[in-house]
Image: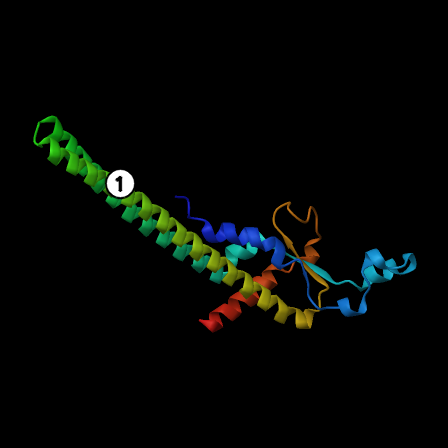
């Protein structure tokens, strides 16, 4: 099972959506550029205040995300250890059965019973593995939603003073192919998030 990066993968997937939102800055007093008369388009552009956040950097520095990822890694390791122990135990029992069967230690009925028992145990182990994987996936999704809400709520508070028209997300080359570093507010956002998270703890 490859669950090690559940949180980070989930966060990267959702990051595109939660930051490309109008942040109640100057939007009320501006007209969408696409609908503006030709003479006012430059005025609209001049009225926009835009910034961006490097999502990969944010996720790697936000303490809440780091701690969630560490917890998920520990849980994944525990699941893997549990499954490995049970798998090894089953393999040993299968080898023991094979050895005894080849040395005629079972009657035909007893051999069939033992074979059925081992088959059932293998099926139960497969069911357990699927259930534990599903539990990890559900928890990862819950963590991802909590992280999204945490960042979204912070940005809404943060933007009351900053009054950006747009705060864009930048994940590699997915969104912004080029952006002036002067508009990069990643460190400021990370600092604010971590400060708030520490206080909550």
Extreme residue toward the right, this view = 39
Q: How is the image coloured?
A: rainbow
Residue 43: image location, x then y, percent = 86, 62
Residue 14 is left or right of residue 23, and the answer is left
Q: Is residue 172 above or below residue 97?
A: below
Crowding at dot 1, Cα within 10 Å, few <14 / some 14-19 / many 20+, comes out as: some
Residue 11 is left or right of residue 82, and the answer is right
Extreme residue toward the front, this view = 109
SS label for mark 1: helix
Is residue 1 or residue 191 the one in the foreground? Answer: 1
Q: Quadrant of residue 157?
A: bottom right
Q: Quadrant of residue 94?
A: top left
Is residue 110 or residue 79 the one in the foreground? Answer: 110
Q: Residue at x 12, y 26 (%)?
A: 102
Residue 52 is left or right of residue 141, and the answer is right
- Which corner quadrant holds the C terminus? bottom left
Numbered label tally: 1
Residue 4: image location, x then y, percent = 42, 48
The residue indicated by pointer 1 is 122
- Which corner quadrant holds the N terminus? top left
Q: Residue at x 40, y 51 (%)?
A: 134
Residue 87: image location, x then y, percent = 26, 41
Q: Is residue 84 above or below residue 97?
A: below
Q: Residue at x 63, y 69 (%)?
A: 156
Q: Residue at x 73, y 64 (%)?
A: 165
Q: Is residue 121 above or below residue 54?
A: above
């Amino acid at each position: 099972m490859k669950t090690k990066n559940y949180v980070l993968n989930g966060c990267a997937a959702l990051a595109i959506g939660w930051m490309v939102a109008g942040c109640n800055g100057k939007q009320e007093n501006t007209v969408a550029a696409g609908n503006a008369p030709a003479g006012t388009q430059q005025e609209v552009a001049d009225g926009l205040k835009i910034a961006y956040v490097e999502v990969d950097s944010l996720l790697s520095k936000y303490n809440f995300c780091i701690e969630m990822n560490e917890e998920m890694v520990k849980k994944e390791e525990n699941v893997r250890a549990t499954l490995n122990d049970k798998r090894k135990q089953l393999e040993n029992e299968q080898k023991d059965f094979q050895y005894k069967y080849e040395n005629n230690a079972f009657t035909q009925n007893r051999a069939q019973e033992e074979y059925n028992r081992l088959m059932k145990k293998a099926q139960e182990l497969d069911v357990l593995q699927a259930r534990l994987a599903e539990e990890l996936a559900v928890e990862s999704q819950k963590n991802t939603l909590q992280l999204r809400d945490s960042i979204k709520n912070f940005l809404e508070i943060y933007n009351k003073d900053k009054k950006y028209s747009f705060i864009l997300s930048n994940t590699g080359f997915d969104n912004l192919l080029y952006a002036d570093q002067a508009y990069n507010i990643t460190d400021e956002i990370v600092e604010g998030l971590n400060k708030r998270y520490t206080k909550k703890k």
